[in-house]
Image (spheres, helix red, strand yellow):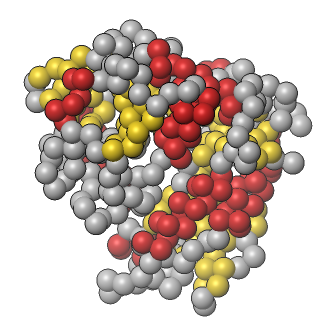
């Protein structure tokens, strides 16, 4: 497969239209067969449920070129399962994860020329999403839906190298107890936009959200989970019913225990503990781990011992190991890597 003539090493993390995408529609209680199309436009009724009541959910994953030249995806079955959970919570029809994975595979295969070459630092980002396409004016679920998958080649999340972030503890709430924080609903991200714009205006890279009930426990950022490293090298992540179950976080916790021999723990983490940690990172699909060097709590600076120059040593081992698995340099656990054939 001849690759497209793209300056792979200078891509940013943005949208580039690729040739084909997968589309299927739900009507009269069933999904149609679906298939690939070259049309990147979505045409819907002005009264579509997604426009009136934000009935939508999405996923994000990547395809990679491995060191030996294969094109692979990373744990797409977990993305499919998470979308099933999102659909159930939003009263949307479930698109079965087996079909989800097949749609992802079809779309990547059809756009194989856009999968960046190994060593370029770029990847193919995959965006599956579903929305209410049928008209609805009363507050209720729609009757018709569309599921789509598109791809776009993207550059690394970090341009010019990894630089630890400065984040603030936010006064805004990301998600309420018993709300939708545990699913990947589009409305969750809309709610976070004002907070992140405000954070950037104040000179911060991201927000740290606390639990909405007590404002005492760490939850997540607008688009990533937290991991912390204790001074005795235990890997700790927050437990909460209102944070998104990150596939990257789950994978990092497995890598920490099974590959690096580190102790791991998922538990409630209180704001008062932050100064006791040695390292902190934000984990997600885009960057795997974004290191945090400083947390600001309403003017009080918590400077992590890992500093503002580089990733902390344990965070770096986690990053190198997981990316090594994704890129085929390190043997993966069974089922983690699915090859596009």
| Residue 16, above or below 212 | above
Q: Is residue 333 visible?
A: yes
**Depth check: 140 or 163 in front?**
163
**Residue at 32 percent of width and 83 percent of height:** 139
Percent of width and height locating residue 58:
51, 58
Query: Is residue 180 shown left or right of residue 170?
Result: right
Indicate the position of residue 131 as horizontal and vertical percent values: 50, 69
Does residue 267 lie above or below 331 as drawn? below
Q: Residue at x 59, y 22 (%)?
A: 320
Camera-nearest residue between 85 and 65: 85
Residue found at the far right of this picture: 1
Q: Residue 313 location in percent, x, y?
A: 47, 14
Front-most of 197 and 96?
A: 96
Furthest toward the top, the residue is 309
Residue 238 figure quarter: top left
State the residue at coordinates (15%, 46%): 215
Residue 113, located in which quarter of the rendered image?
A: top right
Instruction: Say left or right for 16 vs 213.
Output: right
Can see residue 198? no
Q: Quadrant of the N terminus?
A: top right
Residue 297 in the figure: left or right of residue 137 = left
The answer to whether residue 38 is left or right of residue 194 is: right
Say which of 265 and 245 sits in front: 265
């Amino acid at each position: 497969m001849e690759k497209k003539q793209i300056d792979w090493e200078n891509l940013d993390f943005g949208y580039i239209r690729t040739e084909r995408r997968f589309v299927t529609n739900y009507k009269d209680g069933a999904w149609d067969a679906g298939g690939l199309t070259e049309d990147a436009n979505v045409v819907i009724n002005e009264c579509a449920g997604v426009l009136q009541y934000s009935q939508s959910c999405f996923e994000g994953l990547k395809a990679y070129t491995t060191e030996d030249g294969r094109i692979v995806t990373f744990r797409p079955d977990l993305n499919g399962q998470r979308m099933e959970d999102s659909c159930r919570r939003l009263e949307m029809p479930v698109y079965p994860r087996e079909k989800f994975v097949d749609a992802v595979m079809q779309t990547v295969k059809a756009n194989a020329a856009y999968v960046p070459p190994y060593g370029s630092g770029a990847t193919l980002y995959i965006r599956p999403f579903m929305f209410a396409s049928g008209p609805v004016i009363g507050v209720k679920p729609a009757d018709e839906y569309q599921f789509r998958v598109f791809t776009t080649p993207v550059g690394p999340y970090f341009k010019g190298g990894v630089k630890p972030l400065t984040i603030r503890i936010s006064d805004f709430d990301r998600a309420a107890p018993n709300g939708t924080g545990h699913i990947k609903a589009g409305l969750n991200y809309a709610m976070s936009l004002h907070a992140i714009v405000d954070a950037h205006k104040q000179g911060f890279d991201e927000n740290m959200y606390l639990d909405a009930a007590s404002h005492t426990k760490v939850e997540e950022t607008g688009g990533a989970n937290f991991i912390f490293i204790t001074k005795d090298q235990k890997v700790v992540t927050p437990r909460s019913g209102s944070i998104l179950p990150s596939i990257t976080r789950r994978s990092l916790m497995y890598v920490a225990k099974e590959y690096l021999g580190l102790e791991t723990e998922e538990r409630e983490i209180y704001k008062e503990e932050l100064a006791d940690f040695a390292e902190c990172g934000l984990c997600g699909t885009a960057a795997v781990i974004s290191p945090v060097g400083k947390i600001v709590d309403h003017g009080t600076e918590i400077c992590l011992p890992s500093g503002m120059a580089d990733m902390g040593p344990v965070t770096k081992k986690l990053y190198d190991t997981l990316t090594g698995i994704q890129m085929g340099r390190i043997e993966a656990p069974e089922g983690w890597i699915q090859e596009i054939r």
